Amino acid sequence: MASGEALFNPYLPEFHADPYPFYHRLRAVAPVYQTPMGFWVLTRYDDVLTVLRDPRFGRDGFEQMLAAVYADDRAESSRLPRSMLFRDPPDHTRLRALVSKAFTPRVIERMREHIQDIVHRLLGRVRDAKGMDVITDLAYPLPVTVICEMLGVPTGDEGVIRQWSSDVARSLDAIGMPSDIEVVARGRAARRELGDYFRRLLPERRRRPQDDLLSLLIAAEEAGDTLSEGELLATCVLLFIAGHETTVNLIGNGLLALLRHPDQLGRLRDDPALIQSAVEELLRYDSPVQRTARITTTDVEVDGRTLAKGSMVVAAIGAANRDPAHFPDPDRLDITRRDNRHIAFGFGIHFCLGAPLARLEGQIALGTLLRERPGLAVDATPTWRESSTLRGLRALPVTF
């Protein structure tokens, strides 16, 4: 790991399997690190927090970088604009306000019983089996069913749009970094297909509004300049992808961490009331979102280094959540950890809108699985997805 490039190379198979030794080394030798490509990587908790909440680090400078991923040769009228994820105020504020009411803790808590029913139904399908793939049988279908219901996606269409979502998520690794041309092309095509899919749902929803997010967004669009049709579609695509990708990883990564730490697994089985604290620790320990990025809107000095205006800055959330300056013995899983101020859901104006939903789904899925499937054990070597921005498992076969 002597070369500068090896200090931060998220394309290495070893990085996919375990990025945390890379983070620790980078934090120790170059916590404010400029890669050979020119962008900066920050790995200390305090620095990452600054990037996430300081307006000098913005999103509006991503046009050129996003063009490589989201370029579209269609007519201007049919192109999707940037989602609120890649916008700064006031546009971000306007767009987020339209959907935030659907994700408040009070609204999400009312979904608890329904989410529990979905989990029971999914586990019921493998009741007579001696094992399951946690990702295929539970971690994926649970959140995708919930977000499809919230958006008003017809039952049965989840399978059709699963690959599109996966391709868009994978293409996030390409923003500002060298990447496989095919990965970029698939991500571009998938975002276009998802936009077209939601566009085809609009006529029916306009005629017959329902109690779902799509109908709510259409009403906002029809109200005037609050939301354009392009913004409506871009918001649907964002909500669909963000509404399940990270939760899949929370459930999969979290269960694997527990299975690899039988003392913590046993403690949670003995005291199910620890599930909330456990989920927070699992979010910290192996964060579903490993990094995010901003563009400096002015020259910014960090630890004596000057980050010039227009620089891309990668905030390594996964590294921040293992910073020993904020988390004693950070590589130890402790489901009773106190003062656990992790930033797995981000911070500031882009704090994850769906955090209450992801937390609830994770608590119910993991709590029910441990309660109803005694003797859980990993059946084969878990396989990690190639994405390093969104960290998660492709498969987690278990026996019970």
Image (cartoon, rainbow, N blue to C red):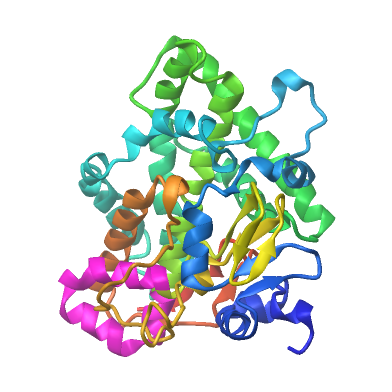
The correct choice, above or below, for 174 with respect to 323 in the image is above
Can residue 158 be spotted in the picture? Answer: no
Q: Nearer the viewer, residue 342 or 137?
A: 342
x and y, in percent, of residue 399 in the image: 40, 79
Q: Is residue 114 above or below residue 247?
A: above
Residue appearing at x 49%, y 60% in the figure? 50
Residue range highlighted in magenta: 255-284
Q: Is residue 351 above or below residue 371?
A: above
Tell me, yes or no, if residue 283 can be seen here.
Answer: yes
Q: Quadrant of the N terminus?
A: bottom right
Asked whether 392 or 62 is in front, the reply is 62
Viewed as shown, does residue 25 lie left or right of 187? left
Instruction: Give x and y (percent) for residue 40.
Output: 68, 65
Residue 125 image position (x, y, % from top left) = 36, 59
**Magenta stretch holds residue 371:** no
Q: Nearer the viewer, residue 160 or 2?
A: 2
Task: Find out whether residue 278 is within the magenta segment.
Answer: yes
Q: Is residue 87 above or below residue 270?
A: above
Nearer-the-camera pick, 124 or 218: 218
Residue shown at 53% from the left, 14% from the top: 203
The answer to which quarter of the image holds residue 387 is bottom right
Q: Quadrant of residue 23?
A: bottom right
Q: Residue at x 36, y 80 (%)?
A: 258
Q: Main secondary structure of the magenta part?
A: helix
Which image quadrant: the C terminus?
bottom left
